[in-house]
Amino acid sequence: MDNAVNSFDMWIACSIMVIAVVVQSLVFFRAGLKRARELNIPREKLIHGCRSAAITAIGPTLSSCIVLLALVAVIGAPSAWMRLNDIGAARTEIAVATMVESVVPAGSTPTVKLAYTQWAMGLNNMGWMLVALLLTPSMGTMLNKMNSSFNPKAVKMVMHGAALGLFANLLAGGTIGKPVPSWLAAVAAVFGIVFILRFFGKNQRLLELSLGIAMVIGMTAGAAYYYMTL
């Protein structure tokens, strides 16, 4: 079984999706640069934006690496590599892989279990794709209607409030009812970003990295407390 899930053929098959994601990223990046030139956005701001995005991505990537280790043990390295490069959330991938164990017929071979897992994870990702496909084209139209029917400033405030509520919900899900390390990670991250904004508010380079730095501070504090109390 281990030879099958980690075979060269699986690496080739799984690389197709990863290559597609890389190509899409390059296409969108090129389109973004083209649009930036049309809008006369200074090159310096483009560099700042790209650097900030790259640094900020470090935090979420670390959590994906943890999920990667868990998925490798369940579905093998090639499939785990493919799934974590696909659309969706890393935590849903491991959740789906775990739920499959409860629905696979008793006495099934490891190959059948792998097939169930692959289908389940594929359907999970399809949900994300269908929602984006159906709703994204109408977002611009809906926003224009809202701006024409209501005060644009109020609409903008509502949008900011929605984003704040979204991340507050994610924070609540990761802290309420969770052990001390989770709370400590959240508090340390908040203090980290507040400290940067308070004392280094004029340092543009550091502000670009503030979110990524706060994530690393939070994860370090939570992990340190966890291992110190073992």
Image (cartoon, rainbow, N blue to C red):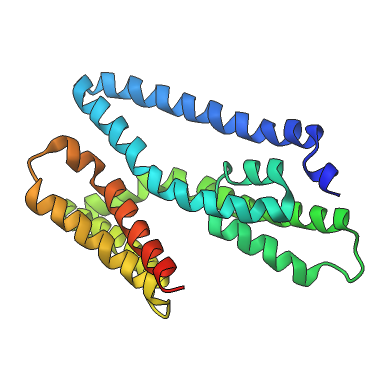
Query: What residue is rendered at 7% in x and 50% in y?
Result: 199
Q: Nearer the viewer, residue 120 or 83?
A: 83
Query: What residue is rendered at 40% in x and 24% in y?
Result: 31
Single out the residue that lies furthest toward the bottom: 177
Q: Is residue 37 left or right of residue 172?
A: left
Q: Is residue 24 left or right of residue 157?
A: right
Locate residue 8, reporting x and y percent: 79, 32
Q: Is residue 110 left or right of residue 210?
A: right
Query: Considering only vertical position in the picture, is 81 above or below 9?
Result: below
Query: What residue is rendered at 82% in x and 59% in y?
Result: 113
Taking the image as drawn, is residue 89 in sight? Answer: no
Query: What residue is rendered at 72% in x and 56% in y?
Result: 74
Q: Nearer the viewer, residue 71 or 154?
A: 71
Locate residue 201, reporting x and y percent: 9, 46
Locate residue 116, reporting x and y percent: 79, 57
Taking the image as drawn, is residue 66 in sight? Answer: yes
Query: Considering only vertical position in the picture, is 110 above or below 36?
Result: below
Location of residue 52 by image quarter:
top left
Location of residue 77 by image quarter:
top right
Location of residue 105 by image quarter:
bottom right
Locate residue 175, reporting x and y percent: 38, 73
Q: Is residue 228 left or right of residue 1?
A: left
